């Protein structure tokens, strides 16, 4: 599996992601969370044939494969636009074994699949939670800011 994953993108472990030492992503005053419309997040297991191909190459899954299954991989594609000659994009594989992070990433996928604005929902849930309504909230993962899935947008403009 590692060779399959490595050949398809750069693996970024997100459980303890901090970014470079000189990088920070504080929320500016009067800002809202925005999902980049040119970014897509996909579960590696949803990519057609990934799991079936791995099983057919390896036969039965060993205990080592079972341990690797505890990790979940997500593919992040971000296009930074431009014309064809100047277009810029990244493709990463985000890896986590943390159940809370897996739940959060799967929630992002569910929101996207239903056509919802993840950033808007997170901001509404955060506001409701601060008002004492007990709505479950997630803090946006730093790696998703760093790689361009999320950003803070000034609402005063």
Image (cartoon, helix red, strand yellow):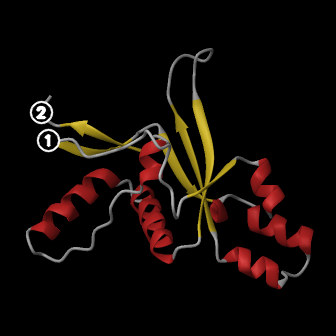
- CB under 8 Å between callouts 2 and 1? yes
| In the image: residue 131, left or right of residue 144 | left
- Please report whichever mark, 2 or 1, sits nearer to the chain's N-terminal start: 1
> Label 1 crowding class (10 Å Cα cut-off): few <14, some 14-19, many 20+?
few
* Residue 84 picture location, percent across and down: 60, 18
* Residue 121 picture location, percent across and down: 26, 58
| In the image: residue 50, left or right of residue 133 | right
Is there any visible trace of residue 35 in the rendered image? yes
What is the total number of numbered labels drawn onto the structure image?
2
- Image quarter of residue 69: bottom right
Closer to us: 17 or 30:
17
As drawn, the residue found furthest toward the front would be 21
Residue at point 62% right, 47% down?
92
Q: Which dot marks residue 30?
A: 1
* Residue 149 picture location, percent across and down: 44, 45
- Image quarter of residue 124: bottom left
Residue at point 12% right, 67% down?
130
Q: Which dot marks residue 60?
A: none
* Residue 51 picture location, percent across and down: 75, 68
- Image quarter of residue 140: bottom left
Q: Specify the quadrant that holds the N terminus.
A: bottom right
| In the image: residue 1, left or right of residue 132 | right
Closer to us: 17 or 136:
17
Residue 121, above or below 83:
below
Residue at point 83% right, 64% down?
53
Disc 2: which residue = 156
Closer to us: 113 or 73:
73
Is there any visible trace of residue 117 in the rendered image? no
| In the image: residue 91, left or right of residue 49 | left
> Label 2 crowding class (10 Å Cα cut-off): few <14, some 14-19, many 20+?
few
């Amino acid at each position: 599996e590692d060779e399959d994953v490595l050949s398809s993108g750069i693996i970024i472990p997100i459980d303890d992601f901090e970014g470079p030492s000189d990088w920070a992503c504080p929320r500016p005053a009067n800002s809202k969370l925005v999902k980049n419309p040119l970014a897509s997040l996909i579960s590696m297991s949803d990519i057609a044939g990934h799991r079936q191909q791995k099983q057919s190459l390896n036969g039965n899954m060993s205990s080592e494969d079972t341990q690797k299954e505890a990790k979940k991989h997500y593919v992040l594609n971000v296009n930074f636009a431009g014309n064809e000659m100047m277009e810029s994009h990244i493709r990463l594989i985000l890896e986590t074994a943390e159940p809370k992070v897996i739940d959060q990433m799967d929630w992002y996928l569910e929101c996207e699949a239903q056509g919802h604005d993840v950033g808007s929902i997170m901001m509404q849930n955060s506001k409701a939670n601060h008002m004492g309504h007990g709505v479950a909230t997630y803090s946006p993962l730093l790696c998703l800011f760093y790689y361009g899935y999320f950003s803070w947008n000034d609402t005063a403009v």
